Image (tube, rainbow, N blue to C red):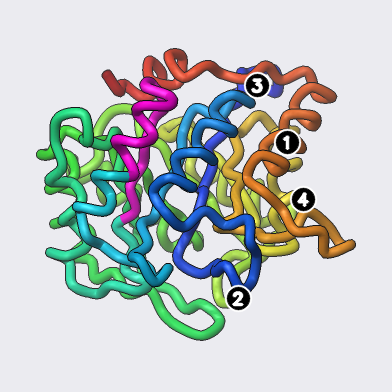
Amino acid sequence: MGRRHKLIINVALTGNVPTKELTPHVPISPEEIADDAKKVYDLGASIVHIHARDSNGCPTYKKEIFREIILRIREKCEDVIITVSTSGRKVKDVGKRLEVIELDGDAKPDMASLTLGSMNFINDASVNHPRDIIFMLKQIREAGLKPELEIFDTGMVNYADYLFKKKYLEGVNYANLLFGSLGTMPATPKSLINIVEELGERMIWAASGIGSFAFQIQCLAVAVGGHVRVGVEDSIYMNGSRELATNQKLVARVRKVAEALEREIMTVQEVRQNLGIS
């Protein structure tokens, strides 16, 4: 992948952690999430990665809430690629985590996230047993969705290689590389280059850092020919001045970097073609 290859912008709109108390700019309700999706879509984002929140603002796996979010997004930007979260950070039960992939019709998502291992965060853990990863991957593929692979450490790249060898993963796949969370890959140029070399040519990859590391990793990804994930989920601040971020500002900023490095923005239809999503 060359430096002039068109850029995919993936936006993690909400996440599990940010609250209205931390930042008023995190979209919580289905209407807020759909509004933010439209704003970033208009700026060139082709993928939106969504988490659902209940009426109290707490993370939820309930497919009824995901349904409302997806339908509202489709009303505003029909062709944007929608990834739903199956995170095990707050919900441990695999059946509950997979409830969202049962959605169909206009509410059917395009992709579903899948973390390829267990890890510690600052105050909690995300546990992903190997049998659960394989089971979830099978269910995601059988539902006709593309997995959005989440990679936080080099061991997860090794596990992805195993999944390819066993034919659990086939064809072109997409991965988010996430750096800088305590207990996972450090947010350094060496770390990014090493893991990209391990991935080889078998995946389309995007990268971001967590918190204050977000922008530097995004810049590195753009510079070396990768793609980017941005969003309030990963960083609620714009920079060292502690200016609160919005999803729209985060996308606009990375677009300026892409323009400076002469990277065109890939359209939604081009991304669909590249990932094999109808």
Separation of disc 1 and disc 2 at Cα? Answer: 24 Å
* Crowd band around label 2 with a 10 angstrom C-alpha radius: few (<14), some (14–19), many (20+): few
Q: Which mark is residue 215?
A: none
User: Which residue lies under the disc numbered 2?
Assistant: 182
Up the image or down, 128 lies above or below 77; here it is: below
User: Which residue lies under the disc numbered 3?
Assistant: 2
State which mark lies toward you, 1 or 4. 1
Mark positioned earlier in the residue sequence (3 or 1): 3
User: Which residue lies under the disc numbered 1?
Assistant: 254
Q: Residue at x 57, y 43 (%)?
A: 229
Up the image or down, 4 lies above or below 185; here it is: above
Name the amino acid type tagged 1.
Val
- Tell me where the magenta segment starts and ends, as one range: 69-85
State which mark lies toward you, 3 or 1. 1
Q: Which mark is residue 216?
A: 4
Q: Residue at x 43, y 74 (%)?
A: 119
Mark positioned earlier in the residue sequence (1 or 2): 2
In the structure shown, which secondary structural element does the residue marked by tag 3 occupy?
Answer: loop
Name the amino acid type tagged 3.
Gly
Name the amino acid type tagged 2.
Leu
Mark positioned earlier in the residue sequence (2 or 3): 3
Mark positioned earlier in the residue sequence (4 or 2): 2
